[in-house]
Amino acid sequence: MLEFPGHQSFDFGQLLQKLVSAQAPKLPPVRKPFDSEVEFFKRSPGTAGMRTEDGSVILNPFNGPEINQKSVIMNEQARVLFKQGKVPQPDFDITEEQRSLFKGTPYEEDEEALKETIAARILSGDSSAGEPTPEQIEFVEKNLSPMFAFEPQFEGLF
C-alpha cells in the first residue's frame, strides 16, 4: 500500500487483480556495470543506479545498505521504458514544489526528462519526487504500474 499524505492511498495488490494480461511484460535487464561505469560511480557516489545506452539498468556497486536496490531498479527500468517508447510520455503538470526539488539538476532544463523521473520515482515510492498530484498518480497507475505488477526477478543481484 502506497500512501501519500493528503491524498488517497492505493494498493498495488488491487491493481494486480485488475490486470487482464496473462503474462508479465518484458522489463529492461539489470546487468553488472562495465569498468568505465564503475569509474563513473566512483566519481558520482550519490548516483544509486542508472539506465544505460544499451537499454539496461545498472546499480552503483558502492551503494550502502540504506539504498533500496529494488526501488532503484524499478525507477531506472521505468526510465528505460520511456526512452524506448514502450510507455507514453508523461503529460501531467509539474508542481512548483517539484520544480524547486530539481533546481540545479540536469532535469531543471529538460521538461520531458523531469516528467519521466517524477513518474518513475512515484512508481518506485521515492519521496524525492515531491508530493505527487492526483493527475501524476493516475498517469503512473495507468501507464507504469501495469508493467511492474508482476514481481520482478532479482535473483543473483543481491
Image (cartoon, rainbow, N blue to C red):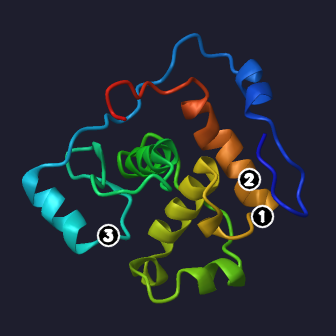
Judging depth in this view, the residue of 44 and 29 nearest the camera is 44
Residue 42, quarter of the rendered image? bottom left
Q: Secondary structure at mark 1?
A: loop
Q: Residue at x 61, y 16 (%)?
A: 21
Q: Check if mark 2's residue and mark 1's residue have beta carbons within 8 Å.
A: yes
Q: Secondary structure at mark 3?
A: loop
- Would residue 124 appear left or right of 39 to someone viewing this image? right
- Sort mark 1 into few (<14), some (14-19) or many (20+) by Cα contacts within 10 Å: some
Q: What residue is disc 1 on?
A: 133
**Discs 3/1, front:** 3
Decide which of tag 3 and tag 1 comes sooner along the chain.
3
Looking at numbered disc 2 in the image, what kind of residue is underneath it? Answer: Ile
Q: What residue is disc 2 on?
A: 137
Find residue 51 and name its label.
Answer: none
Looking at numbered disc 3 in the image, what kind of residue is underneath it? Answer: Pro
Looking at numbered disc 1 in the image, what kind of residue is underneath it? Answer: Thr
- Sort mark 3 into few (<14), some (14-19) or many (20+) by Cα contacts within 10 Å: few
Q: Residue furthest left?
A: 35
Find residue 45 and name its label.
Answer: 3
Q: Secondary structure at mark 2?
A: helix
Quadrant where the N terminus is found in the figure: top right
